[in-house]
Image: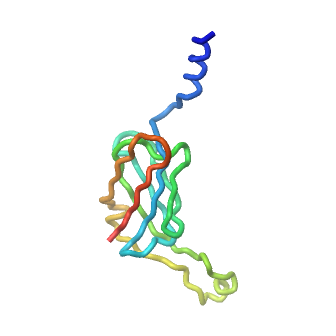
Amino acid sequence: MIALGLLVSGGCSSESGPERRVVTGRVTYQGEIVPSGEIRIAPEGDGPVSAAQISNGVFEIAQRGGVVIGPAKVMIVAVPSAAGVSQDELDRGGAKPKTMAIPAKYNDKSVLTAEIQSGDGAQTIDFDLE
């Protein structure tokens, strides 16, 4: 009976695929929060890319258990944000969405890296881009 219990509990706790961890953090560029964007973290070896939206400088990658453990390449893109802009302002064309241009060295030609560590709870990684 004990062996059966160990077998069942062992089967429930194991998941297929690489080990993952939830990653949270904040993103700033030249001292200002990135108002809206996307962050992607790709493992250096085999494994799926993990991504999340950046909102008011904050992100959390928790989908499918988080980011694959180990060294990774990080790509950050800022996108226009219409937060705080009324529909009337948008209709009149008078409101310009807040945007921030981030250099290619942080997105499609990224030099950013991170080490995703094994552990319990979320790992916090902040990106202060210059």
Q: Is residue 8 above or below residue 105?
A: above
Q: Is residue 109 above or below residue 83?
A: above
What's the colour scheme?
rainbow
Name which quarter of the figure residue 117 lies in. top left
Q: Is residue 113 left or right of residue 2?
A: left
> Who's the residue at 50% across and 64% down the image?
58
Q: Is residue 7 left or right of residue 99?
A: right
Where residue 130 appears, x then y in whole percent?
32, 71
Q: Is residue 45 above or below residue 13?
A: below
Where residue 101 appears, x then y in whole percent?
41, 75
Q: Residue furthest right?
A: 88
- Give the position of the N terminus as an image quadrant: top right
Q: Is residue 38 left or right of residue 42?
A: right
> Who's the residue at 46% across and 69% down the image?
78
Q: Which is nearer the eye, 2 or 107?
A: 2
Where residue 20 appears, x then y in whole percent?
47, 41
Q: Residue furthest left?
A: 111
> Who's the residue at 61% across and 87% down the image?
93
Figure disc tally = 0
> Who's the residue at 55% across and 29% down the image?
13
Where residue 22 appears, x then y in whole percent?
49, 48
